[in-house]
Image (cartoon, grey):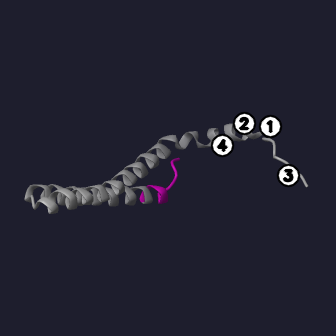
Amino acid sequence: MRTRVCKPIPETRHVVRRVIAELHPYRLRLAGYVLLLAGASLSGVGVPLATRYLVDHGLATQDVGDVLVSAVAILVLGVASTAATSSARHSATSSAPT
């Protein structure tokens, strides 16, 4: 038996346009969510990189300056990640604009 491939529905463009039109009043809020989540993701990636730097450069060479820089970077990135994530959650649960 031969499998049929579904063809795109011609109304798909109209549906997408309607969805975009419905989301238009929320575009700034959606952009804010995207920026907050991108910031949380980037700071979440930064913590392991700072930890790698701490181990490879600070602890391996026993350089106190590198250890302090790495520790401060880990702290700042952790706080930034927490703040961005909690802001995105708080924003998502707040009321819709009127």
Residue 96 x %, y %: 52, 52
Q: Secondary structure at mark 3?
A: loop
Which residue, given by chain and number where applicable, does mark 4 sit on? 19
Name which residue type carries label 3. Thr
Which residue, given by chain and number where applicable, does mark 2 sit on? 13
Judge left or right: residue 21 versus residue 38.
right
Residue 18 x %, y %: 68, 40
Q: Label 1 to label 3, Cα distance in Å?
A: 21 Å
Please tell me whether residue 38 belongs to the stretch shown in magenta: no
Of all residues shown, which one is farthest toward the right? 1
Judge left or right: residue 74 versus residue 31.
left
Verify CB contact (< 8 Å) between mark 1 and mark 4. Answer: no
Name which residue type carries label 1. Pro
Of residue 63 and residue 9, the one placed in the foreground of this image is 63
Does 93 appear above or below 26?
Answer: below
Verify CB contact (< 8 Å) between mark 2 and mark 1. Answer: yes
Q: Which residues are magenta?
A: 90-98
Q: Label 1 to label 4, Cα distance in Å?
A: 16 Å
Which residue, given by chain and number where applicable, does mark 3 sit on? 3
**Which of marks 2 and 4 precedes in the sequence?**
2
Which residue, given by chain and number where applicable, does mark 1 sit on? 10
Of all residues shown, which one is farthest toward the front? 60
Q: Label 4 to label 3, Cα distance in Å?
A: 31 Å
Residue occupying image coordinates x 26% and y 58%: 52
Q: Label 3 to label 2, Cα distance in Å?
A: 26 Å
